[in-house]
Amino acid sequence: MSSGSHLFALVDGNSFYASCEIAFQPKLARRPVVVLSNNDGCIVAANAVAKSLGEQWMRQRGSLGSGGYRSAVPTNMMFQPYFKIKPLLDRYQAAVFSSNYELYADMSSRMHRLVGHFAPRQEIYSIDESFLDLSGLSHLDLTDYGLQIKQTVQQGIGIPVAVGIAQTKTLAKLANHLAKKQLSQQGVFDLTQFKDETLNALLAQVGVEKIWGIGRQLSKQLKQDHIQTVYDLKIANSKRIRKRYGVVVERTLRELNGESCLALESVRANKQQIICSRSFGIAVQSYQEMESAVVNYVCRAAEKLRQQQSVCNFVTVWVTTNPFDDKRPVYRNQQTIGLIYPSDNSSLLTKLVKRALKQIWVPGLSYQKAGVILSEIATKGALQEDIFAPNPTYSGNPKQAKLMALMDQLNLTSGKNTLFLAAAGMPDKQGWQMKRDLMSPRYTTCWDELLTVR
Ligand SMILES: [Mg+2]
């Protein structure tokens, strides 16, 4: 392996939502624990105990199924409707939770903060994943360093994480996958420690579909081309790959070979998160100025969201003072707020951003940079609407959708302030808090109805 100057770690929470619940009720750790989505009652997270239970069960069903069409039976319980799995979960006394997104968002922000201490630069990739730039730390025992990260998060907030370390982000993602699979590694896997032959033998055991960015469709095509494993893609002819699959897959191939092509916070197509951040020309000291900056950022980010026909589940605001000012200590903080229903609405997101900023603002400091991150991005309309509890948020409201379209139009023709002013001036008749109070009881009632109907 080349001794590239880059070094990345990917830190990823294990079964994050389930782990958040277990962190507050450690007794549950030995029992199956699952978390359900709010809208459609699917299983969105399961701890290892529940997963293995589900796998056994799926296998049995597969082999007992008529005609032996095993492939028609899902191999795990993730995203399966709850009612299908409920008998199994009941039999094994599983703990079942509906999503508590505010808790998860809060745990997420704590986790990212703890992890962020281990490197000068961090990219928050999703609610439970962040990349660290460890370049310059190659003199350390990296497995040891990874264990330190893992222990810090475990002790700090009780969440188990896996740490993958490698020369490129793609390899770090893969290392993280291996860290989770190979129990002997204690949840830390450093790919830089291996000689080429050892590494290649390892990569030859991992299916090509496990590579970051290689989706199900693409891996099908690759497999038809006899590229079955990660190793197969690694040694494929890069020109041929580029011609047949495009530059993105070619870049992946290069990354598999240890050539770092993706920097932290790189821009991706249909991004899993949208980031809008900027360093201030002159340090910001007033709250009003800071608020107007982050509101501007969130409006721009929401516009991007709508352009790609997506909705987000979380909004994060972060602020920092100048990290290179050696006279004053650095203040860095962030706050993430989870949406009850995913949204693309500037007005709603603006409210959340203002609320998040209030929680992290410390007066009397000179802020150098701030940013907004929209994360857990999903395609609009891909989420099944709950027929018993219609989506009460702005994005589900046709009038609001029209308004957003109009604002985007205006923004195109009349400049950014138009969008900002319209969004900030929305009347606040139905506060977010109110909707949430309404939703919880309805969710339970309607869920019972749903079960009875089925
Ligand atoms: Mg995870």
Image (cartoon, helix red, strand yellow):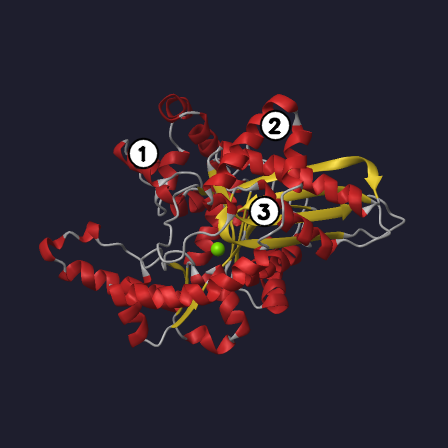
Say what amino acid the circle numbered 2 marks: Asn
At horizontal 49% and vertical 38% (from top left) the residue drawn is 401
Q: Could you say which is closer to the camera, residue 186 or residue 12? A: 12
Q: Which mark is residue 348?
A: 3
At horizontal 44% and vertical 51% (from top left) the residue drawn is 391
**In the image, is the residue at mark 2 within 8 Å of ligand 1 by its beta carbon?**
no
Question: Percent x, y for residue 126?
Answer: 53, 49
Q: Which image quadrant for residue 50? A: bottom left
> Circle 2 sits on which residue?
411
| First in residue order: circle 3 vs circle 1 | 1
Q: Which mark is residue 441?
A: none
Look at discs 2 and 1 and give the one toward the viewer.
2
- Residue 311 in the image: above or below residue 147: above
| Callout 1: SS | helix
- Mark 1, other Cα within 10 Å: few <14 / some 14–19 / many ≥20: many
**427 sits left or right of 289 in the view:** left
Q: Is residue 252 visible?
A: yes
**152 sits left or right of 56 in the view:** right
- Marks 3/1: CA distance? 42 Å
- Marks 2/1: CA distance? 42 Å
Q: Are marks 3 and 1 in contact (CB under 8 Å)?
A: no
- In what quadrant of the picture does the C terminus appear? bottom left
Q: Residue furthest right?
A: 327
Question: Percent x, y for residue 71?
Answer: 21, 50
| First in residue order: circle 2 vs circle 1 | 1
Question: Percent x, y for residue 113?
Answer: 66, 56
- Mark 2, other Cα within 10 Å: few <14 / some 14–19 / many ≥20: some
Q: Could you say which is closer to the camera, residue 423 or residue 66? A: 423
**In the image, is the residue at mark 1 within 8 Å of ligand 1 by its beta carbon?**
no
